[in-house]
Image (tube, helix red, strand yellow):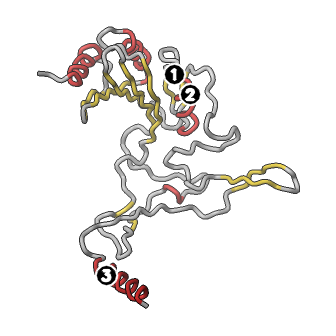
Amino acid sequence: MMSRVQQLSDDLQQVFAAKLQSNVVVRGEVTIELSPADLLDVCTQLRDQQRFRFEQLLDVCGVDYSEYGSSEWATDASSTTGFSRGVNPGANARLRFGEAPAYVSERKRFAAVYHLLSVTNNQRLRVRCYADNDELPIIPSVIGIWNSANWYEREAFDLYGIMFEGHPDLRRILTDYGFVGHPFRKDFPLVGHVEMRYDPLQQRVIYEPVSIDPRVLVPRVIRDDGRNAEAIADTAETTEGESDA
């Protein structure tokens, strides 16, 4: 017997075959991919057609695929302290303002991902739409289809710089009005571009170029393969000896 998830995928393929760039079922979830030109038409039908009836938009997530598939850290080996060592350093926290990393992903850079819920049919669906232009990512706003898209799209704009065409009030929602850049982009430094402090002479908050060095996040890798057993035993004996004393 065909599962309800697979049936949903087949129904989507039957109705929107010419407009689906991708239709996959992974781990019991259906994900379809649409172009910006087809997004509004397909989403309207997903809401209105009885076989779908996705009445609720639960979330809109921005995604930056610029470093998709790349790994900056070698995790097959670790030092005696349990830390792995980085190889082929990527950009991440090392960038300064105006610098740009060499991206490795072959796909388009920015996408909006929509999570839909059908209360009527008790089903969920994920819809992904890539912006055609990496320099100025523009995707149609679905606020006319689902009102809940309002703040979700503002968040994706604020953090990723994705422009949602047709949104009535596309302003920053999480960062300051004078914030420079989009902090969830992969080329945005972890330390940011500017820092702020209160200046007692000017009696106001001022912004200055960031003065601290870029941070590097080194993941801690703990492996239970006995490589640190001797060091752990020595530490335990020393601690026990100090307690007896």
Q: Which mark is residue 91?
A: none
Q: Is residue 180 left or right of residue 110?
A: right
Outermost bottom residue: 245
Q: Is residue 142 left or right of residue 238?
A: right
Q: Quadrant location of the N terminus?
A: top left
Q: Quadrant of residue 122?
A: top left
The reply to whether dot 1 and dot 2 touch (C-beta < 8 Å) is: yes
Which of 200/142 is in front?
A: 200
Amino acid tagged 1: Ser
What is the x, y in percent for residue 28? Answer: 24, 31
Q: Which residue is at the front of the view, 79 or 185?
A: 79
In the displayed structure, would residue 236 be above or below residue 57? below
| Residue for point 27% across, 13% down | 15
Neighbour tally class for label 1: few under 14, some 14-19, many 20 plus, Cα within 10 Å: some
Q: Position of residue 51 (x, y in %)?
A: 29, 11
Label 3: which secondary element: helix
Mark 3 or 1, closer to the camera: 3
Rendering coords of residue 144 (x, y %): 52, 15
Query: Which badge, 2 or 3, comes first in the chain's sequence?
Result: 2
Q: Is 16 located above or below residue 32 in the figure?
A: above
Q: Secondary structure at mark 1?
A: loop
Label 2: how many Cα within 10 Å (few below 14, some 14–19, many 20+): some
Marks 2 and 3: which is nearer the front?
A: 3
Residue type beneath disc 2? Trp
Q: Amino acid under label 3?
A: Ala
Residue receiving disc 3? 233
Cα separation between marks 2 and 3? 55 Å
What is the number of the mark on residue 151?
A: 2
Of the numbered discs 3 and 1, the one sitting upstream in the chain is 1
Rendering coords of residue 84 (x, y %): 37, 67
Q: Quadrant of residue 199?
A: bottom right
The residue that mark 1 highlights is 148
